[in-house]
Amino acid sequence: ETGVTQTPRHLVMGMTNKKSLKCEQHLGHNAMYWYKQSAKKPLELMFVYSLEERVENNSVPSRFSPECPNSSHLFLHLHTLQPEDSALYLCASSQVPWGTDTQYFGPGTRLTVL
Amino acid sequence: AQSVTQPDIHITVSEGASLELRCNYSYGATPYLFWYVQSPGQGLQLLLKYFSGDTLVQGIKGFEAEFKRSQSSFNLRKPSVHWSDAAEYFCAVGAGGTSYGKLTFGQGTILTVHP
């Protein structure tokens, strides 16, 4: 595997379910990110991790819970989601966590909340 | 706070025609500018970036962009479009200093290519 991978690629869940999204980067980077991409809206940065420490949380509801066990893996745990949470969730990584550094994106997980 | 405007939501061109996608940014200091492309069902792929130096930047797939500070613009160009260029294009500006991951994206421009 190369670059940034995400699993699953598609996920359908009910509002009472608990699921997790997984991201893995094979680039040796130290920073990882979660973004939300909704229809007709710009990409929204959700979380930033630097060396497994969360350094940014952009006012994301607590029903989204990120986890970064090491610098190569990032999870987004989901519980009691709402239909408006349906979106494409993108993971990205960069060498350092600054906005000036190039971010490399995974293919995304298409989430549908029923 | 920084912002990015992509004035064109949707652009249609014929294969072989030239292309220019517009991007205007607002940022108080020297901007770090990026263009990404997203094919349907895929993540974002970096086309090119501008940090400093030569204001004409070359990228992958035959794309280039020109940074014009006086116009706060970073327009993307390609001299001859191929059908495989049909995708959505995003301009983004990164904050300098220690703003964690602060990459602000525009709304995107959808490119349709007619044969």
Image (cartoon, coloured by chain):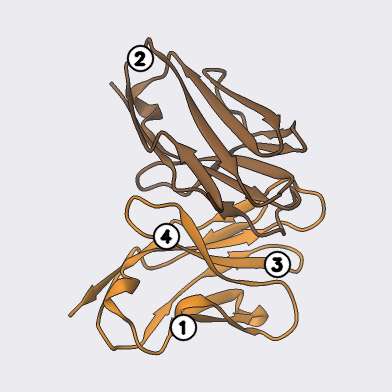
Chain colours: A brown, B orange
- Same chain, marks 3 and 4? yes
Q: How many other residues sit within 10 Å of disc 1, few (<14), some (14-19) or many (≥20)? A: few
Task: Say which quarter of the image contains residue A109.
Answer: top left
Report the mark closest to the observer, 4 or 1.
1
Label 1 lies in what chain? B
Name the disc covering residue B62, or none.
1
Q: Amino acid at mark 4?
A: Gly
Residue A9: quarter of image: top left
Left-right relation of B107 to B25: left
Which residue does the numbered mark 3 point to in the structure image? B31
Q: Secondary structure at mark 1?
A: helix
Q: Foreground: A94 or A100?
A: A94
Q: Would you call the spot at circle 3 few (<14 residues within 10 Å), some (14-19), or many (20 or more)?
A: many
> Amino acid type of disc 1?
Gly
Specify the subunit that label 2 lies on: A
Callout 3: helix, strand or loop?
A: loop
Q: Position of residue B37 (x, y in %)?
A: 44, 63
The mark lying in front, picked from 2 and 3, is: 2
Residue located 54% across and 69% down the image: B24
Which chain hosts label 3? Answer: B
Q: Nearer the viewer, mark 2 or mark 4?
A: 2
Which residue position holds label 2?
Answer: A15
The disc placed on residue B108 is 4
**Mark 4 surroundings within 10 Å by alpha-carbon count, few (fewer than 14), some (14 through 19), many (20 or more):** many
Element assignment for label 2? loop
Both labels 1 and 3 in a single chain: yes
Measured as percent of width and height from the top left, residue B16 is found at 28, 88
Q: Earlier in the sequence, mark 1 or mark 3?
A: 3
Farthest residue in the right direction?
B97
Q: Earlier in the sequence, mark 4 or mark 1?
A: 1
Mark 2, Cα crowd under 10 Å, few <14 / some 14-19 / many 20+, is: some
